[in-house]
């Protein structure tokens, strides 16, 4: 039996752990064994502290035996993206800059997971400082798409998505600033949800763009995703932008057959691959067949989303990443001189090219004489986009589009053209700019490569998104899929 | 240094950075205070560890609001923070959280008192307008030692209120008077301790000069980081003289940022306009704009103490105090309240109470080794009032009061108890005194003095008082003795 544990959903693992079919230690040992044989191929994890994992598993088994189990996640491993602080574990953001850093504190979500009895399982690979859409920007190792190891898993939460698709872990945390949960979920055939801005505390999430960043759950099914989301969301006084859930459980709720679905006009036009368009159209037809009202909606400022995002996100990033200077922690250059010379050398050596590109871009758009033309205008565009989305979502419950225009590309294929890479996020970025919840659900394939569709809802409509995803998932065979490795 | 020649006018504006009196830092729960080991008062938020976030300390905001109410400012319903980005190792995040566009305090004014022609005469009063005051975080301290650099982040994140004046000050004396008044207001309201030796108040000083009568302001220089009132005064004097010298020589003033070396008493250029930083300000995305409810403002308004100069006017006009005593008392709220408690116990003679408090009490408190703070004063206000009352009622003489005061200060005992224990109570029994006086007057040895007195020599009467005091062991009320003696001698 032990060799098949990696195929089970988190919900099923929870039921079997509760029934005493196996222990958390047995589950973790099985996943560690699988990690040993597959992680080199997939590159999903950058670090796995086996002794720490087994100690957590043993503690969970003791609790369960004593009748002090902490709920449905008790004893279940959750992979953690390497930009989320876990006390005593590395916190590198896949950057040379933070390679020596071990976090002295727990993020809010790490505390929540511990309180739920979950096992904090390893550090997941990512694009450096969450900047990228392919995990090619990791300073340590590339991650690969388990469905085709020559291709990228997406990014920046590429390690999280690849680990799920490869059966290395049943649940994972990602973070999403412009699509970093949903785009890799789509490319790897898993479910990823970016919550409403402020639902989950960012305390302990290494900031990329503070006004856009959210931690979110990733899993192989909508049900598992909901399970993890419910454990993560709670108010936290340490994040002034976090208000937490409104009180209701964050589970699929309501009759998804009554949802009004909006399809933005022209979204399936230029740039969307034929197979992607076909799979997403089939999803639209599925909902229509279930009784959902489908209508076309106008989002006239949608084209502004990508440029707006690359101004706002890089501006905030240029400031957020200022603290990495070699003075207090992280990489310090061997170059000596004045403190400022040391800081300059440390930053030049510690950051990779994509991070430098975005810091420079962000510094430029905030500079005197340019801020009004770029940053201030971007804030206006952002407000306009948010207003249009909220207006559209007053007439429909969810907006449906592809998650990504094309399936996963080959490693290195777009490395020379950052602008092409930035367009990967054209469907996902507006939800971040508007602070709205969004989910990517697998809905088909282009050859071997998974394709997902994307739902955006009004603030705090996570339950609707989950219900819609669940309806689709139950009627199709895409959930719980793992790549044949 | 001389003042500016009379055909030049100096225009001064100050930016005063004050560390607020709070338990915790402004965006972190770490405590702060003076005299700790380096990097003892830090936590992940103070150090700017990856993933940490600022949380606004309500206490710091309320202290800032309280300051605003003290100076009669507007408290906008909404304030917000911005990031000021610059790289320096004393700055843990390489940006400073500050309030650029929506400060917590807008407007207001501070009353100042200029030095009078002499210590005993009150000088002119004026108002200095406050442009705004905003809340920000202090930075760490960098020191260079042994070829390396060391940084202490204990000070990083300490709440700072930056108080920005309008360019209303016209002399070094005015700048000095403003700072003294500001410090008194801040400390009396409990907003800040303003201990300059601990760096709790630092000043940036903007100075320009113009020909008297000229409506346009001259080019200004800004001297940064002055940590004492005397440094501000000296900077103004030197900078005024330097600018006048330059302009009179036909040169122009460069807009520049300057430093001040207090040891050498010399200013120097830090950077000129071309090297000015581009701070790339933008709204901080981690701190939502803060609403300050009118209920909070109303609650804090109740904590505003009586204005320093309103109190001074009340002491002079209503209590009849001399200016000198009033000005000493009002400078320290605790002292003024101590004084008022004493007056409440003996309302008949505020000046008598003020005299003892402002002179004897303050002198003995500060002369003690180590000096005794007022809070540990061995004499209670009501006890001091008791002493004044005994003197006013003629129970003891003014001379005896000094002796009793000294005894009260060293033992903490009540005045009446000391008077009784020492047998100092003056004899005011008219019948008994009259009997003694008649006996003394009848003594032939004083006949000559009596004759001289009756012949018009006023002073001759004093020769009779000695034997009377001797007979009463010094307890006779001197006034009563004089009165009775004159009546008996006719």
Image (cartoon, coloured by chain):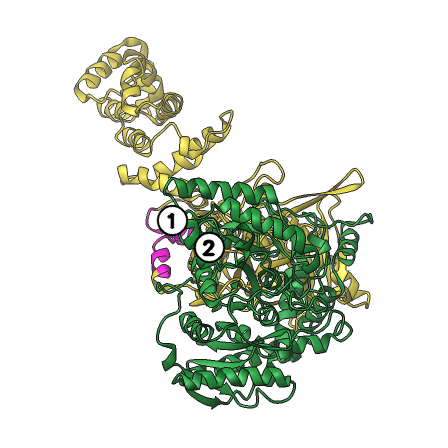
Chain colours: A green, B yellow
**Can you say whether A422 is above or below A282 in the image?**
above
* Dots 1 and 2 on the same chain: no
Query: As rendered, which of B387 and B207 lies closer to the eye?
Result: B207
**Can you say whether B311 is above or below A41 in the image?**
above
Q: Which mark is residue B316?
A: 1
**Can you say whether B219 is above or below A103 in the image?**
below
Residue A11 visible somewhere in the drawing: yes
Residue B86 visible somewhere in the drawing: no
Query: As rendered, which of B246 and B196 lies closer to the eye?
Result: B196
* Percent position of residue B263, x then y: 73, 43
- Chain designation of label 2: A
* Percent position of residue B456, x then y: 34, 26
- Residue A117 shown left or right of residue A363 in the figure: left
Query: As rendered, which of A57 and B73 lies closer to the eye?
Result: A57
The residue under the point 22% across, 14% down is B436
* Percent position of residue A80, x then y: 57, 55
Q: Residue furthest top?
A: B444
Q: Which mark is residue A13?
A: 2
- Residue B8 shown left or right of residue B454 in the figure: right
* The C terminus of chain B - image quarter: top left
Q: Is B316 covered by the magenta stretch?
A: yes
Q: Is B88 covered by the magenta stretch?
A: no
**Can you say whether A353 is above or below B455 in the image?**
below
Q: Dot 1 lies on which element?
A: helix
- Chain designation of label 1: B
For the residues carrying marks 1 and 2, which lies nearer the camera in this image? Answer: 2
Q: Which mark is residue A371?
A: none
| Among the 4 quarters of the image, the one containing residue B386 | top left
Give the spatial CA distance, label 1 vs label 2: 84 Å
Q: Which residues are magenta?
A: B296-319
- Main SS class of the magenta portion in the image: helix
Q: Residues within 10 Å of mark 2 (few under 14, many from 20)?
A: many
């Amino acid at each position: 039996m032990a060799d098949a544990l990696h195929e089970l959903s988190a919900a099923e693992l929870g039921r079997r752990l509760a029934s005493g079919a196996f222990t958390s230690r047995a589950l973790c040992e099985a996943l560690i064994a699988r990690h040993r044989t597959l992680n080199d191929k997939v590159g999903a994890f950058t670090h796995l502290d086996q002794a720490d994992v087994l100690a957590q598993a043993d503690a969970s088994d003791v609790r369960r035996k004593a009748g002090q189990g902490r709920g449905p996640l008790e004893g279940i491993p959750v992979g953690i993206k390497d930009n989320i602080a876990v006390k005593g574990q590395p916190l590198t953001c896949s950057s040379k800059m933070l390679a020596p850093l071990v976090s002295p504190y727990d993020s809010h979500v790490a505390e929540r997971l511990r309180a739920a009895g979950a096992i904090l399982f390893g550090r997941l690979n990512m694009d450096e400082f969450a900047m990228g859409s392919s995990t090619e920007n990791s300073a340590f190792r590339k991650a690969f798409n388990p469905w085709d190891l020559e291709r990228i898993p997406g990014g920046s939460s590429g390690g999280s998505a690849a680990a799920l698709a490869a059966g290395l872990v049943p649940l994972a945390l990602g973070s999403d600033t412009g699509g970093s949960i949903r785009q890799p979920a789509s490319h790897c055939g898993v479910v990823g949800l970016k919550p409403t801005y402020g639902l989950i505390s960012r305390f302990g999430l290494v900031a990329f763009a503070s006004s856009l960043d959210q931690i979110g759950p990733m899993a192989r099914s909508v049900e598992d995703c909901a399970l993890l989301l419910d454990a993560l969301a709670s108010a936290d006084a340490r994040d002034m932008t976090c208000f937490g859930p409104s009180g209701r459980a964050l589970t699929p709720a309501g009759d998804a057959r009554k949802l009004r679905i909006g399809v933005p006009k022209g979204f399936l036009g230029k740039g969307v691959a034929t197979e992607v368009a076909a799979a997403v159209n089939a999803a639209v037809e599925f909902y229509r067949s279930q009784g959902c009202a489908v209508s076309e909606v106008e989002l006239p400022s949608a084209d502004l989303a990508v440029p707006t995002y690359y101004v706002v996100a890089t501006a905030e990033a240029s400031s957020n990443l200022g603290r990495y200077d070699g003075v207090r922690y992280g990489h310090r250059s061997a170059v000596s001189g004045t403190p400022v010379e040391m800081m300059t050398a440390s930053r030049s050596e510690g950051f990779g090219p994509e991070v430098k590109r975005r810091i420079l871009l962000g510094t430029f758009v905030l500079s005197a004489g340019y801020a009004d033309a770029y940053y201030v205008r971007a804030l206006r565009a952002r407000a306009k986009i948010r207003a249009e989305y909220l207006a559209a979502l007053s007439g429909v419950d969810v907006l449906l589009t592809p998650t990504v225009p094309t399936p996963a590309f080959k490693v290195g294929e777009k490395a020379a053209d950052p602008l092409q890479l930035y367009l990967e996020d054209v469907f996902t970025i507006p939800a971040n700019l508007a602070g709205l919840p969004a989910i990517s659900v697998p809905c088909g394939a282009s050859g071997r490569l998974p394709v997902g569709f994307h739902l955006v809802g009004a603030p705090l409509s996570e339950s609707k998104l989950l219900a819609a995803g669940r309806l689709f998932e139950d009627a199709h065979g895409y959930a719980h899929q793992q790549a044949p490795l | 240094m001389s003042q500016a020649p009379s055909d030049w006018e100096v225009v001064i504006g100050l930016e005063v950075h004050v560390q607020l009196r709070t338990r915790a830092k402004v965006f972190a729960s770490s405590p702060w205070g003076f005299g700790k080991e380096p990097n003892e008062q830090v936590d992940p938020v103070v150090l700017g560890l990856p993933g940490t976030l600022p949380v606004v300390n309500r206490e710091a905001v309320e202290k800032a609001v309280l300051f605003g109410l003290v100076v009669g400012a507007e408290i906008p319903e909404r304030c917000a923070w911005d990031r000021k980005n610059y790289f320096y190792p004393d700055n843990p995040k390489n940006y400073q959280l500050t309030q650029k566009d929506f400060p917590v305090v807008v407007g207001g004014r501070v009353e100042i008192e200029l030095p009078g022609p002499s210590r005993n005469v009150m000088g002119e009063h004026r108002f200095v307008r406050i442009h705004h005051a905003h809340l920000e975080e202090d930075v760490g301290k960098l020191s260079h030692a042994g070829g390396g650099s060391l940084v202490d982040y204990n000070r990083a994140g300490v709440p700072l209120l930056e108080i920005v004046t309008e360019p209303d000050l016209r002399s070094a004396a005015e700048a000095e008077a403003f700072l003294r008044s500001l410090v008194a207001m801040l400390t009396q309201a409990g907003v800040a301790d303003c201990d300059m030796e601990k760096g709790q108040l630092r000043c940036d000083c903007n100075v320009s000069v113009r020909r008297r009568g000229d409506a346009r302001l001259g080019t200004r220089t800004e001297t940064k980081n002055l940590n004492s009132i005397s440094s501000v005064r000296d900077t103004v004097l030197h900078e005024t003289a330097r600018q006048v010298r330059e302009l009179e020589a036909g040169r122009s003033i460069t807009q520049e940022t300057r430093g001040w070396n207090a040891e050498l008493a010399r200013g120097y250029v830090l950077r000129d306009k071309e090297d000015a930083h581009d701070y790339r300000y933008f709204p901080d995305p981690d701190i939502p704009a803060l609403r300050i409810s009118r209920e909070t403002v109303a609650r804090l308004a109740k904590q505003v103490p009586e204005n320093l100069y309103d109190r001074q006017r009340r002491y002079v006009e209503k209590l009849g105090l001399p200016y000198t005593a009033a000005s000493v008392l009002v400078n320290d709220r605790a002292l003024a309240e101590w004084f008022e408690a004493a007056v409440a116990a003996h309302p008949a003679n505020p000046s008598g109470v003020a005299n003892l408090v402002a002179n004897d009490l303050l002198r003995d408190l500060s002369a003690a080794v180590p000096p005794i703070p007022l809070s540990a004063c061995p004499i209670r206000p009501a006890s001091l009032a008791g002493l004044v009352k005994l003197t006013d009622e003629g129970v003891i003489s003014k001379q005896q009061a000094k002796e009793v005061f000294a005894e009260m200060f060293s033992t903490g005992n009540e005045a009446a108890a000391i008077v009784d224990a020492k047998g100092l109570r003056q004899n005011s029994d008219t019948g008994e005194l009259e009997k003694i006086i008649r006996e003394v007057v009848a003594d032939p040895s004083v006949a000559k003095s009596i004759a001289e007195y009756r012949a018009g020599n006023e002073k001759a009467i004093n020769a009779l008082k000695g034997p009377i005091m001797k007979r009463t062991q010094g307890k006779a009320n001197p006034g009563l003795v004089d009165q009775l003696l004159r009546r008996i001698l006719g």
